[in-house]
Image (tube, grey):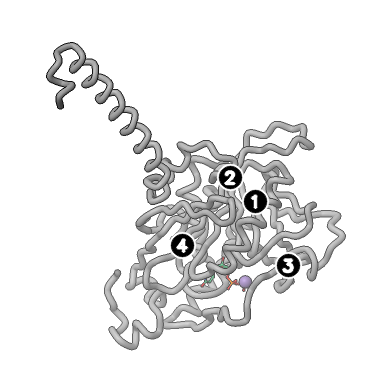
Amino acid sequence: MNVCLRGKRCAKVLIICLLLSLILTVWISLQLSPIITSLSVNTSDCECHPNEDNAHHKAKDMSSTETSSHRLAVVVPFRDRFDELLTFVPHMKTFLKKQGIDYKIYIINQMDVYRFNRASLINAGFLISRPECDYMAMHDVDLLPLNANLSYHFPTDGPFHVSSPQLHPKYHYKTFVGGVLLIRGEHFEKVNGMSNNYWGWGLEDDEFYVRLKEANLFISRPQGITTGINDTFRHIHSTHRKRDTIRLFNQKEITRKRDRKTGLNSVQFRLKSVNEVMIDRSAVSVYNVQLICDLSLTPWCQTRQTIASKGPKAANS
Ligand code: UDP
Ligand code: MN
């Protein structure tokens, strides 16, 4: 304090003090900013940090001479498959990078109380990814491509079924289109996406096959692949993952028919939040979605336990 009583010198010391505290404030805020962004749930925050392992992966494969302006949305319908996700994300990153694919992975996490609905999650994932991507891979989280010749490039001619019946480890019927299917945005729109009636396991992909067929979209499949059903994919489906195959109300009857009413234009969901999750050094976006079920149309969206405890008209959550 004594120093400050001496006029000009006092002013100098004050200015130095002010400058020092300014520098200190800037330094502290720089140190804190990574913590704030890592807590954020907003995807755009993540994209502000140019990082090799960020959600967008620009084509970098120098062996590929073609310059492609296409971007792939890897849309993964998801619930309670964290173990598989830990393997899926780094595997896909390595696999797609080798092909020079520009892509983003969209994990569509179903967080409502209803039975799993793979098709509605794919519809939601398509709508979420559409502004950023012009084609989509409808991709199971537990199916890992092993053969580098399985192309994930833009399917110019029509839908490309990567996990064809000749290559999929489990499903070998001719009209199978599940597992991994590449489709251009406009083709998915043309068929009004997938039916929203399929709660629980199975048949939604078979109904989608009929949609493609009726729209005269020819499904092509990998050619000249020398691996087979045991070594083209790894199906990391543990035996404790039981498939939800029960059929409730008139589900069996309705889901065996072609659905001409529901689809991309009628899917209803709430996007509750988005998490940027780092798995090893790969960032992946998890979209937390609550599907909305019209109980008067598809009461079988409810679990058997819900029906038993609340009666068939349990309210929307
Ligand atoms: N899935 C999920 N949680 C579930 C059920 C299914 O995440 O409770 C997703 C996951 O991406 C999975 C896909 O839906 O790979 C297909 O389901 P599943 O593996 O049971 O069918 P499969 O093709 O093995 O008969
Ligand atoms: Mn599976």
Residue occupying image coordinates x 42% and y 49%: 38
Dot 3 crowding, Cα within 10 Å, few <14, some 14–19, many 20+: many
Residue reaching furthest left? 5
Between the residue at mark 2 and the residue at mark 4, the CA separation in whole angstroms equals 21 Å
Nearest to N terminus: mark 4 or mark 3 = 4
Q: Tell me the amino acid under the disc marked 3.
A: His
Query: Do the residues bearing badges 3 and 2 touch, measured as CB atoms within 8 Å?
Result: no
Residue reaching furthest top? 8
Residue at label 4? 109
Query: Do the residues bearing badges 2 and 1 touch, measured as CB atoms within 8 Å?
Result: yes
| Mark nearer the viewer, 3 or 2 | 2
Relative placement, left or right, of 307 versus 219 is left
Query: Do the residues bearing badges 4 and 3 touch, measured as CB atoms within 8 Å?
Result: no
Residue at label 2? 53
Residue occupying image coordinates x 52% and y 62%: 77
Nearest to N terminus: mark 1 or mark 4 = 1
Nearest to N terminus: mark 3 or mark 2 = 2
